Amino acid sequence: MKKTIRFAGLMILALSALSCTDSRVSGDRRYGYLTVGVSDELDDLVHLKSEEEEDIVYRLDLYYSDDVLAKTIEDHRTVTEEEPIELLMDKYRVTATSGEDGTAFNSPKYFGENTVRVLAETHSNVDINCKLGKIKFSVKFPEDDDFSSKFPSYELAVSNGETLTFASYDMPDDPSFGSFTDTAYFEVPENRILTYTLKLRNADGAMYSTTAELAQVEMAEHYHFEFTLGEREEIDGAMVLNILLDGEFKESYEHKINLNFDKTIMPSYSTNPEFNPDEEGIIYPLGNDILKSFTFTAGRGIKSLVISHLDEYLLAEGLPQLTDFVNISDEELQIMEDIGITASSVSEGDLTATIDITDFVSRLSISPDNKPYLMSLTVIDTYERYARCDFAFSIVSDIVAETVSVMPWSGFATLSGRFFSKSAPEGLSFEYRKVSDSEWTEMDPSLMDIDLESLTYSACLNNLEPGADYVFRATSAKDKADGKTATEIAFSTYPTEETVYNLSFDDWVKVGKAWYATDDYNNHLVWDSANEGTADILGQSLVPTTPEETIVISGKAARMESGELLSNFAAGNIYTGDFGAATLSPVGAKLDWGIPFNSRPLALRGWYRYEPVAINRTSSNYSYLNGQTDFCQIQIFLTNWSKPFEISTGDNRFVDTSENNPDIIAYGGFISQDNTTDNLGNQNGYIRFTIPLEYRSLEEPSYIVIAGAASRYGDYFTGGLGSTMYLDELELIYDPAELTPAEFEAVMKNIR
């Protein structure tokens, strides 16, 4: 049985528990103002400063003294003396960041931080000196015709564990390759060593390679390699190359390398006549079994024969990221044979080898996301020269339209499919049936939502039976003509379309001086309000929420009027849950928000009437609202809680409804300052509203919260005395046909 709890002598009750969101407003904390100075003059640890670094935009992150993020400013230039940052009084840690982590071309990162104390009504300033947070690396090769005629192909690969390659040739689809006009940025490795490998191919096709290390590298150092040709003297058929390492962190020095180009034929590969892996845009249908065999040769002997890739989908199909067939173990060889890749036995020094990938390709699934698979096959000889084939190909369905996925609800489901041509095929549609039926029903093709960019299509299948088992498949005019059918996907609609008791607000009982929206206070209490804590305090009473019998849409309505008790503001409100207790220390109230609920409604619809007044009661933190028109608020959200959420106004603990809270499955809200009685019309000043529930996940809900308040900021003792809101005839919407296209899009936009 529910008990009414009263505390004599309690002078302040924070009882209006509406629009309770995460907040740091409490006590007499006041606002101060902050400007931030970010130095673009990188300090002396940055030894070379290039033009692209001269105009840097920093993101500012401001953290409270307990290291919780208070505010983010995306562009530090927006913070000026005229437009400072408004902050609560506290000590802050302020960071300035430009760029992202990671090793990549043309991706610097600058970072700095400082602390500052912001005082109330005071203008503070913090200066932050930022520096480069990575190692910078640049390269220059001779640009004259003499050099390029002797070396048609050359590259410098630099690695800290992750490799970036400056190359004389283009690799547009590989972000680890760049040109000599690019700049590489590396994270500092734990061993503080950068490894670099120089490779040059001469006009005869011979390859030279050499590897060396840079030790004791430091963050914010700039290493610039400049290569120049030396004298053209012949030393056993070799050429002398001078390497100039130029940087301000140490004296420049010159290094000479003998380039010993072997005249023996370079490593190479060939394929069977039906198979050309060097073509662009290769497409194979599912199960394609055209022979795909490689033959590798190396006149100086094979040192490595490698299949490698960085494709997450190939990894999911069982292909290791790197396999060397030279001296491969029996276990590794069996793994490759199990997935359909066979190779001739090959040992180091062998002159030829073969690899057959026919069965592997024939077993692959349709290319995910319409992106091609990419794998590389590389032979390296004992002179460190190589030949590589980068094999890119797509697997498509052997039918026109393919089934993708389904998102079931209670009375409807959203169906997804895809196609493989650049234009939409004729007659794209879906067929469906109940599992217990034998006949298929085809949807009207005009109802399909087609996306030519992603080559996908979708549709909303309505008028389904809740809790029923269905199956569907994609189809097209050509597939039907050819007698082909797509994969079938089974799904079950959501079993129930729950409602919340007394959404009409027709049932009310009075217990003592407090009103409750129920027909049975002891056994059927779904709705509660601040009434319980304000009904009788020191002989005074305030009952903000009451039944309304005259100004209604039908039957009765909920009337919420903001008022004052013992000189403290209390907003009229109502919510699904239970008033827990008034508290003395800290002063406030505890309320349990939410009731059990296991369905997926699309929206909350109902009628509201609002008569706001000017805000004339504020806490110190909300004094800037004084004189503005009051706000009403209506909220609905679904959660995955295991029990009701205990709000404690005294402890400043509220429900965080932001998108960062994984406990909130779906949320919808409505805020207004409009006086709806300005045009009474035929509905007693009521306006019909629809609040779409914007779903963030398809997790099964466990609790629902519906809440309304006459003063949105009543949680913080702020609002207008006399602001009054009425709610009547609420309902939960489950049928998408009852929503506008924009409302339905709001429901679905985050989960498609």
Image (spheres, rainbow, N blue to C red):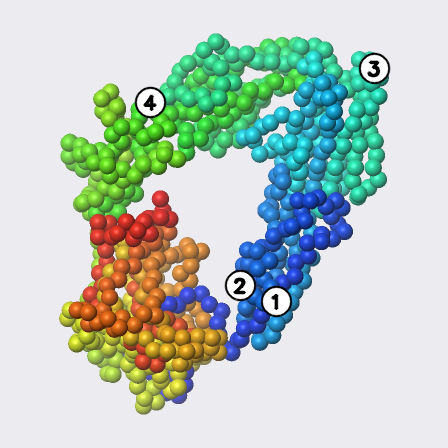
Q: CA distance from mark 3 to mark 1?
A: 68 Å
Instruction: Please give the residue where the numbered disc 1 appears in the rendered image.
Output: 81
Tell me which numbered mark, 1 or 2, is placed earlier along the sequence: 2
The structure residue drawn at horizontal position 66% and vertical position 44%, both measured from the top left corner, is: 52
Amino acid at circle 4 = Asp
Instruction: Please give the residue where the numbered disc 4 appears in the rendered image.
Output: 398
Q: Quadrant of residue 246?
A: top right
Instruction: Please give the residue where the numbered disc 3 appears in the rendered image.
Output: 234
Q: Quadrant of residue 650?
A: bottom left
Secondary element under disc 4, as helix, strand or loop, is loop
Q: CA distance from mark 2 to mark 3?
A: 68 Å
Residue 415 in view, yes or no? no
Q: CA distance from mark 4 to mark 3?
A: 60 Å
Instruction: Please give the residue where the numbered disc 2 appears in the rendered image.
Output: 70
Give the class, few, some or many, for how many residues have Cα within 10 Å of label 4's Cα (few <14, many ≥20). some
Amino acid at circle 1 = Glu
Give the class, few, some or many, for how many residues have Cα within 10 Å of label 3's Cα (few <14, many ≥20). few
Q: CA distance from mark 2 to mark 4?
A: 54 Å
Q: Residue 65 or 89: which is nearer the viewer?
A: 89
Q: Nearer the viewer, mark 2 or mark 3?
A: 3
